Image (spheres, rainbow, N blue to C red):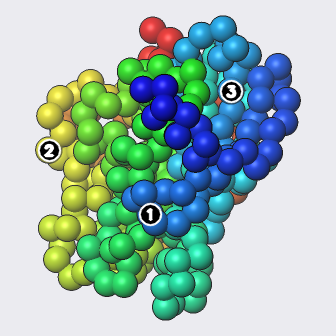
Amino acid sequence: MNLLKKAENMALKQISSNKCFEGFQKVFEHDSVELKCKMRFGIYLPPKAEIGKCPVLYWLSGLTCTEQNFITKSGFHQAASEHGLIVVAPDTSPRGCNIEGEDESWDFGTGAGFYVDATEEPWKTNYRMYSYIKDELPKLIKANFPADSERMSIFGHSMGGHGALILALKNPGKYKSVSAFAPICNPVQCPWGKKAFGGYLGSDLTQWEAYDATHLVKSYPDSHLDILIDQGKDDQFLSAGQLLPDNFIAACTERKIPVVFRLQQGYDHSYFFIATFVNDHIRHHAKYLNA
């Protein structure tokens, strides 16, 4: 085990470390087995991590983001420090895989992994973000940091909100809680989802539905999942029909799955919106992670 731990440790290269609210915000790079490329993730280690294991909250970012957006713009650190949560923020896709077309558009390919395991050429070798977030990253975190792997939760924004919802819904019991900011709730019905799923998953719609929160919630086995969603009322992507939260809420209501949906007057899709309500989300997760 010690040798393995050493190997895992050696495999992590620290890119940066900054003291923040008595803890440390760090960024690491590693060679991903799932994605077959170098990947970076941000990790905030609260002061409590100096003395014992802490629960882990995973953040999934949206289209075009790297690990940097959340750790520099959301202002989550103070609440994470106070509640003693390790917060992990991975990148949103493989990078530099030299796949033809990977950098052609902002909503597909680089920066747009959509948290699925691609089945189509030329994407299926590298674009395995679902398995990376579900399996590889938590194992890496457990092996290298004082993380209590029995206590995990997940949240995200936009494409990452979609990612958080599907990971929680596809893996009952794995995450203690889930929340999202302006999630893409019904990707099989929206332009972003159709483009991404068509490219990564091909033409079989049942494959698409396996990564669609509105479809997944219909067969979720029980009601033990307390979902919090914040949505800006002035979000340009809400009015453009990309997010479709009403479809998800209707499906949750039908299945009697508790969801708190807050439509926030005047807010848009940006990190200013996230920064305003991120403390509420950290508290939501802390309630379950520290129970």
Q: Amino acid at mark 2?
A: Ser
CB contact under 8 Å: marks 3 and 1:
no
Q: Position of residue 18 (x, y in %)?
A: 84, 36
Q: Amino acid at mark 3?
A: Leu
Cα distance in 3D space between marks 2 and 1: 29 Å
Q: Is residue 262 left or right of residue 50?
A: left
Q: Amino acid at mark 1?
A: Leu
Under circle 1, the secondary element is: loop
Tell me where residue 191 sits by quadrant: bottom left
Residue at 38% x, 21% y is 150
Which label belongs to residue 45? 3
Q: Label 2, on which residue? A: 219
Q: Label 1, on which residue? A: 35
Tell me which label, 2 or 1, sits earlier in the chain: 1
Residue at 46% x, 66% y is 36
Q: Is residue 141 left or right of residue 89?
A: left
Quadrant assignment for the N terminus: top left
Tell me which label, 3 or 2, sits earlier in the chain: 3
Q: Is residue 170 left or right of residue 140?
A: left
Cα distance in 3D space between marks 3 and 1: 25 Å
In the image, residue 283 sits, relative to residue 154, either above or below, namely above
Cα distance in 3D space between marks 3 and 2: 36 Å
| Dot in front, 3 or 2 | 3
Q: Nearer the viewer, residue 286 or 246?
A: 286
